[in-house]
Image (spheres, rainbow, N blue to C red):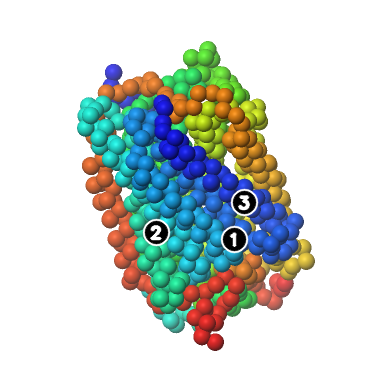
Amino acid sequence: MQVSKSFKRLIFLELSIPVALLTLGIYHGLMQTIFRAGVLQQAAFAKLEYYQGLTLHGVINALVLTTFFAVAFGHATMAFYIKREPNKKLAWISFSCMTIGTVLASWAMLAGKASVLYTFYPPLKAHPFFYLGAALLIVGSWLPLFNWAKMYVQWKRENPTTKTPLAVLGTLINFIIWFVCTLAVAYEVLVLLLPWSLGWTTTVNVTLARTLFWFFGHALVYFWLLPAYIMFYTMLPKLAGGKLYSDLAGRIALFLFLLFSIPVGVHHQYSDPSITQGVKFFQGMLTFGVAIPSFITAFTIAASLEYAGRKRGSKGWFGWMARLPYLDTKNYMFAYLICGLILFVFGGLTGIVNASYQLNSVVHNTAWLPGHFHMTVAGPVFLGIIGMSTYMYSTLSGRKIFMPKINVIIPYFWTIGVLIFSTGLMWGGLLGEPRRTNLGMTYLNPKSEFFRPDWVPTTTLALLGGIIMFIAGMLFIVVFFGTMFRKRSLSAELDLPVSEAYHDEKRIPLFDQFKPWLITMVLILLIAYIPALMNVNKNTGPKAPAFTPENPVPVQMINSK
Amino acid sequence: MSIIDKAEKHVIMITGVLLSVFVFSILYAQAKYKSDVPECLPYDKAYTEPKVIKLDEKTYQVFAVAQMWSFQPSEIYIPVGSEVDFYLSSKDVVHGFNISEKNINMMAIYGNINKTTVKFDKPGVYDIVCHEYCGAGHQNMRAQVIVNYPTVKK
């Protein structure tokens, strides 16, 4: 499909700005493994402080890259399937908000005024620009939903009895989840934290802020994941040379995500005070509800791949696995997506461990956690994002891939790196190694009385994996920008791989409308979160004054001296 | 042909069984080993003064206070076989409280009291590690539970 110049330029910018920032994010990913393994035993390296770099790593990789990509991919998907471009003005306003927000927050982090990590738990206080930047990034990413909703309603009016394309359904559901969950964090940032960071209010209820953050924080991971799910359902079967096993299964999975993504956030607060065991247990059970769509997806995608393998002439139970196009340089998206799936098997299983109520006490806030989520957000999410960024850039600009052989090997290299890295972190976590800690200065420094020799093998393994991941990440950046600087040699158009369905079930109205699902979503949310917020209101005591990361004395007392 | 095929029916059943096993395991562990997440207490200022209280030979209460960047008390001496109630609070930012050998895992939050109970069956030195980022000195924040002083001394 041919699209306008303005629309192309918008997508190019939304893809390349976060990839450029990613160099910094990936750099400090590597640096953390070096610090943690005790190779560096200091607070900072090359003028970048450990916790400052950790904040950049989290914000750039997990918030900026994922949000920009979700918007760019959403624009492309909606335009491609609905055959209409979104309103240009609104799309550019959205882009400007997100970019200004990113610039403000990046300045605060690079200036060392916002080393509060990407969870920014109060009462650690950051520069107001950090909060303002985060709010602009989020609000900017809301606008496309209104754009797309209008396109969808118009399309539906013209095609009332046609099934909504799965990719369109997925994009809309993802941004509805995003809109609802970010309402809480927007409230946290704009009402609780921004005035407090400006000094207009003096104290903040920390548990309330944490509860609002996690209302957003768990749904955030599905916002990362759903673009990858859309690729798994609507592209992977085609790329493998087969068909999607069931179209309806995809719809059911998507609607279940709509119901269960948000009302489970308290499972990140199992170790928090002031929330009753009952509320924690209830949201823990709802978390198992969100495992269902992932099981559905695991089966449906595996069945689709098996179908593709058999079509290519495989025999026996597992023969299909050997017949898939793993190293096809023209069909490189297959490599990115299959690697993401392999990592996600382990990411999903370790996620069930975290969700399992009291079992969480074994792993909470230890290195196990980043070990787990690097197999999700740095697994299917990251691989989907980087593969698709290259793909969209290349097809939409008509430029051939730079170094196609390297491009197809990157995801395998990355996957090996993540598997080693996560094994090191998870093993360390089981031995009590904390996450988010500059271990090199104390626990991994043989001269310190804190020295823990049992964490030497685990952090060394993570370092090894980190080096491999860093090389793979840098290769991607070379391929992406290398492609960008090539001459145009193909026809430039918006084109996405489209899978046919093997079981193309007839349209069931319930799975082709939003209203009943949205009502159920709101009901479950109220049932899950009213008791949690009542707990917080009832059990918390005094609110906390603000602190900077460098000083145990409250900011107000420093200023009044 | 029905909408859901045979393989899908099987997989739905397997998923159901698997999820039931997971949930059953949680309930079983809770009933049999009394393992649970921390208890919820309303805020009470009395717990925010660091101290160790000996209730009887084998029962202790510890009011642990986390602050940038230490725990008070920083060394807790108890005899082997003691059951200890930890009441945890924070004087400033969010801190973590992890005794990895005993699977004790709590967050310390200003204006909130966290509570859990643990029995120390074996003599030894147990590290209490702060596992939530709490500012520039986070990596220096550690305390110890020393079980069976003075036979074991670091």
Circle 1 Cα neighbour tier, 10 Å, few/some/many (<14 / 14–19 / ≥20) = some
Badges 3 and 1, same chain: yes
- Identify the image quadrant of residue A75: top left
Element type at marker 3?
Answer: helix
How many residues crowd around disc 3 within 10 Å: few (fewer than 14), some, or many (20 or more)?
some
Dot 3 and dot 1 residues touching (CB under 8 Å): no
Q: Which residue is mark 1?
A: A110
Q: Residue at x 29, y 37 (%)?
A: A151
Residue type at mark 3: give it: Leu
**Residue A227 circle label:** none
Picture coordinates of residue A559, whole percent (x, y): 52, 82
Q: Amino acid at mark 2?
A: Val
Q: Which residue is pictured at 36% across the width and 45% down the height?
A: A89
The reply to whether residue B132 is in sight is no
Does the CB distance between marks 2 and 1 fall below 8 Å?
no
Q: Which mark is residue A24?
A: 3
Toward the viewer: A438 or B153? A438
Label 2 crowd (10 A; few <14 / some 14-19 / many >=20) = many
Left or right relative to A107: residue A34: right
Quadrant position of the C terminus of chain B in the picture: bottom right
Q: Disc 2 and disc 1: Cα gap in Å?
A: 23 Å
Asked if A539 appears above or below A260 in the picture, the reply is: below
| Residue A3 visible | yes
Query: Which is more toward the observer, A92 or A267?
Result: A92
Label 2 sits on residue: A185
Mark closest to the chain's N terminus, 2 or 1: 1
Q: Kindly identify the amino acid type of the residue bearing the numbered disc 1.
A: Leu
N-terminal-most mark, 3 or 2: 3
Between circles 3 and 2, the one closer to the viewer is 3
Residue B135, picture quadrant: bottom right
